[in-house]
Amino acid sequence: MGVIKPIAAETALIDALDGATGWLAQLREATRVQGLPTRRHEMWKWSDLRRAAGEITSAGQITVTGAADGVLEPADGETVELSVSASAGASAAALSVVVKSGRTVTLVERYRAEAGSLGNIHLDIEIEDGARLERICIQDEAEEGILVASSSIDLAVNAHLNQVAFSFGGKLVRNETHVLHAGEHSEAHLHGVYLLDEGRHNDYTTSVHHTGPGGITHQLVKGAVTAHARGVFQGKFKVDRAAQLTDAKMTHRALMLDDRAEIDAKPELEIYADNVQCAHGNAIGTLDETALFYMRQRGIPLVQARALLIESYLAEPLDFISDEALREQLRERLRDRLRAIS
Amino acid sequence: MAAIKQTIDDVRELESGKYKYGFTTDVEQDIAPKGLNTDIIRYISASKDEPQWMLDWRLAAYERWQEMKSPQWANVRFPEIDYQNVRYYAGSKGGVKYESIDDVPEEILADFAKLGIPLREQEVLLGVKGSENKVAVDAVFDSVSVVTTFKAELAKAGVIFCPISEALRDHPELVKKYLGTVVPASDNFFATLNSAVFSDGSFVYVPPGVRCPMELSTYFRMNAEGTGQFERTLIIADKGSYVSYLEGCTAPMRDENQLHAAVVELVALDDAEIKYSTVQNWWPGDADGKGGVYNFVTKRGDCRGKNSKISWTQVETGSAITWKYPSCVLRGENSRGEFYSIAVTNGHQQADTGTKMIHLGKGTTSRIISKGISAGKSDQTYRGLVSVHAKAEGARNFTQCDSLLIGDTCGAHTVPYIECKTPKAILEHEATTTRLSEDQLFYARQRGLSEEQATALLVNGFVRDVLQQLPMEFAVEAQKLLAVSLEGSVG
């Protein structure tokens, strides 16, 4: 493929990133050579970023509060509130997070993307030996914008990652997480919830690469879509020959609430070690009519019964959030949204 | 675990030398010069006395193919194929047609007899001991069909079973109506190549309401050196009919890689059922990964009518590289597609195989059971698509892909694609990757089985769901094949 003719959003992004270094320089180069990803890129099969960005013509601004100079090194026991906000136009930012050996850290990320925005943000996260990171990504205010939040997480031995992604989608919202998993008592938990309506698009893409023995990865992603919305889940576990005794489980379950929505899933396994337990499950369906009937028969109106069932279905991954107040806050957000939908 | 160790050792020993179909047969043949151009296509077409429209179709496909690129997405690695270094046709000397079994050169009959495929009808009954069932065989030797048995008996039932070259002559209207309607000439790189140069393959037409009185079978044999095989099979089950079709394949051991790019098209009309079974045992290459067949096949069934059913069952043990995705387009209301697969890779084999189930009609159902066993230094990928369109209300899919790894130098991969556009569908997918469970082995041993027997029991149990789907005649062969391919673990 030769160099393609850039669209306005690409030109704006390339110009805005002139002189950038590190990940931003890579993004610039990739955009210059290949353009923004389209359906032709296997990893973006169901999320056509280039098409979604068609109306963007100028550069925008992305602001990150909570991380001075783009570097974060939280203290033991600290909870960092990170707020990312993209204004109209194309923009990109990158920051790095280091969780030092033995520390336990919570990172609460809140994302906002205005209408007409294309915000790219990349987090480079290092979890050192014996450290623990709990990461909550909340993408409930990007509903008219385009947001691509990617992260590369380096998980050392004895380290622990617990990630919960919560999203209401957007014009196109993508949470892309890559974990390099060293094994040897380290664990990765990559959960997620999405609830989409009104033509919104959410893409949760994760890839975990087990390089050392005895690592654990557990994943539970649940979603519900309605009214022209589209939910995408792509999960991949790659287990190297050296990563014997890996225990990896992936589950994606989604509800289709009406017939103008779409769910696409690609739960992928690439296994080179024989003494492992790797499994994935994927189920797509709709609300259980008998459960609805039962609830109505007990005097619960249909609308309420539906909302209750959907809420209990979706809330399961939120149980992995250890902060009770935050968990309850997100449940409430879910409840509000369900009320609005039905 | 000693049993696992034993299995690994046995598998290692097995890597070459046990492929009993590796012999070659000297037969006088007309072999086309190497290379691909319009002259070769005209030569192939002329040697089969094809009508003009068929030649035009081939030439159009060739023109299209020249602009296409070999697909890169599969998880297989091989050096670029020089398509000009392949012979596209090897047929009988002087273009002679064998009118009866007595005209077929004794060498070819002996070749098939050695493969366990007796072609003289009186001998056929002896083929499978204890079986009363007759199996009609179309034997394809390189690029031509040498003989088709039981044609007269099938004709009585109205079933047409003949080489596709003969069908073009005797039933051109049927061929013209259906050829390329399931796999269009421009479908993909290998299918387009096939459309340009296809030689023989089988043609089956089962008239309305007829239950085909016997199993139909085609046996493909690649013999001539440097020759690719490009067969094309077309099966049409008219309203309310039923047919079960079996396919077997072998090739001699050669140092070079041979190309096999076939196209199979199935059409099932209202209430019809087609059961298509394959036991694929092309030469997989030697212990160093040298030689072997490149098996790049496009197979697709179209459930065109309501309540129709197409079922693919495959046992894949051969080929250096397999690239094969038997698929079902579920167009008719309440139609059903099934895919049952056992794939065994050993040595340096690479397999990227799976299925596609495209749900278009209301109430369509599909079931996918895939069992992969990787051993040696092989790599295996299940790649599948389940797509449910907006109008496919009430669609149902169940998919299960299990992989078993034997030894620590192989790989097993699962790449399923799931797309759903209606809330009135239920799609389930499960996949696991493990080795033989130590707990299960222990349990079986504790009940008094030897390690060897316990391993055999577990591996048999692992593939049982699929073996059960094979017609009796093939189940026996498939089980033997598995035993040879993974001797030690199957006891």
Image (cartoon, grey):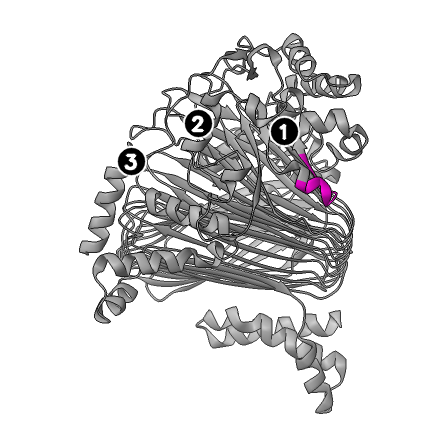
Q: In this view, does B46 lie to the left or right of A75?
A: right
Residue placed under numbered mark 3 in the picture: B15
Mark 3 lies on a secondary structure that is loop
Amino acid residing under circle 3: Glu
Name the quadrant containing residue A241.
Answer: top left
Q: Where is residue A30 in the image (x, y as percent from the top left)?
A: 54, 31
Residue B78 in view, yes or no: yes
Q: Where is residue A124 in the image (x, y as percent from the top left)?
A: 42, 46
Q: Position of residue B303 (x, y in %)?
A: 72, 49
Residue neighbourhood size for the residue with mark 3, other residues' Cα within 10 Å, grouped as few (<14), some (14–19), many (≥20): many
Q: Which of A70 and B245 is in front in this view?
A: B245
Subunit of mark 3? B
Q: Where is residue A331 in the image (x, y as percent from the top left)?
A: 58, 74
Q: Which of marks 2 and 1 is nearer the N terminus?
A: 2
Queried whether the magenta region covers residue B156, the answer comes back as yes
Residue placed under numbered mark 1 in the picture: B191
Same subunit, labels 3 and 2: the answer reads yes
Same subunit, labels 1 and 3: the answer reads yes
Span colored in magenta:
B153-161
Name the quadrant containing residue B284.
Answer: top left
In space, the residues marked 2 and 1 are separated at their CA atoms by: 29 Å
Q: Which of B70 and A70 is in front in this view?
A: B70
**Quick check: B132 above or below A104?**
above
Residue B111 numbered mark, or none: 2
**Quick check: B163 above or below B41?**
below
